[in-house]
């Protein structure tokens, strides 16, 4: 795979065989990020579980202390007072059947998170085949199906992220921007890892956190040691 000069120069500063302490890892990420835009910093955590088994699923949501650095567009399915509260809380779009039809007929997806009040799930359920594959289906576990839609909107806007395993038992999550600096990225990392470790399924056997790598959008990966956390 061809890599540009900037990537190669960044990679030279990172020892691929070393597991860095988190703070040091984020200092390296900030130092080696060379793109002309503010790169997103992602965390990739491989877990020693089998996501094919229902009792070994790892999924949840957590509010990062410094947010993710990106503007999140929120769609809320609610009616009456709850719809008004969602608008006041800063929801970008609020509706009922009108939103379902917009998504179905116009293939409209100008939103990043979907929140719904429990009484609207019968309506939202019609969108399962469209929202599910995109990871947009609201769920009680992620706190996006809730009677308090206003609070859910505020949390999402404040930097709440959802973490879940993919088919290869890896969790991929944004934890901020390069401009945050190592200190804030480290705070966000500790919050996310704390939640993932807390969510360890009782059925998980052996080593729980297999590996942890962080990388900026255009930069090389840096291995992070989680020994002190597990």
Image (tube, rainbow, N blue to C red):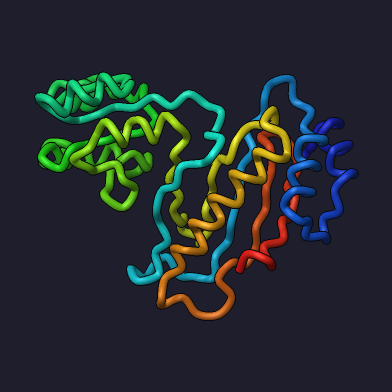
Q: Residue 193's x, y, as percent? A: 56, 56
Q: Residue 146's x, y, as percent? A: 22, 42
Which one is nearer the viewer's eye here, 75 or 158?
A: 158
Kindly identify the residue that appears in the image at 69 percent across and 28 percent down.
179
Quick check: 39 left or right of 45? right
Which one is nearer the viewer's eye here, 176 or 219?
A: 176
Kindly identify the residue that appears in the image at 46 percent across and 55 percent down.
166
Q: Give the image quarter of residue 13.
A: top right
The total number of labels drawn is 0
Using the rendered image of the protein, determine whether residue 1 is visible from the camera's viewpoint.
no
Q: Give the image quarter of residue 80.
A: top left
Q: Quadrant of the C terminus?
A: bottom right
Q: Residue 40's x, y, as percent? A: 62, 33
Q: Quadrant of the N terminus?
A: top right
Q: From what the image shows, is residue 117 above or below residue 172? A: above
Quick check: 107 left or right of 99? right
Kindly identify the residue that appears in the image at 74 percent across and 43 percent down.
26
Which one is nearer the viewer's eye here, 135 or 152?
A: 152
Using the rendered image of the protein, determine whether residue 28 is visible from the camera's viewpoint.
yes
Quick check: 161 left or right of 42? left
Q: From what the image shows, is residue 27 above or below residue 169? A: above
Kindly identify the residue that appears in the image at 76 percent across and 40 percent down.
29
Q: Residue furthest bottom?
A: 206
């Amino acid at each position: 795979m061809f890599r540009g000069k900037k990537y190669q120069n960044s990679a030279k500063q990172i020892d691929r065989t070393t597991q860095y302490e988190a703070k040091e890892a984020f200092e390296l990420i900030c130092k080696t990020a060379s793109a002309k835009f503010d790169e997103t910093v992602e965390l990739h955590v491989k877990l020693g579980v089998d996501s094919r088994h229902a009792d070994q699923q790892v999924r949840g949501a957590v509010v990062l202390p410094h947010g993710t650095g990106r503007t999140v567009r929120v769609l809320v399915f609610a009616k009456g007072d709850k719809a008004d509260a969602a608008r006041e809380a800063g929801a970008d779009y609020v509706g009922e059947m009108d939103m379902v039809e917009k998504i179905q007929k116009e293939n409209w997806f100008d939103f990043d998170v979907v929140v719904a009040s429990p009484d609207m799930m019968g309506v939202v359920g019609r969108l399962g085949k469209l929202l599910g594959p995109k990871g947009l289906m609201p769920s009680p576990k992620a706190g996006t199906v809730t009677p308090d839609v206003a609070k859910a909107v505020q949390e999402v806007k404040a930097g709440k992220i959802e973490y879940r395993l993919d088919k290869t038992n890896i969790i991929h999550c944004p934890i901020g921007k390069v401009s945050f600096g190592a200190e804030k990225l480290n705070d966000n990392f500790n919050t996310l890892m704390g939640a993932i470790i807390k969510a360890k399924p009782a059925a998980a056997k052996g080593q729980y956190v297999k590996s942890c790598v962080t990388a900026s959008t255009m930069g090389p990966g840096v291995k992070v040691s989680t020994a002190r956390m597990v």
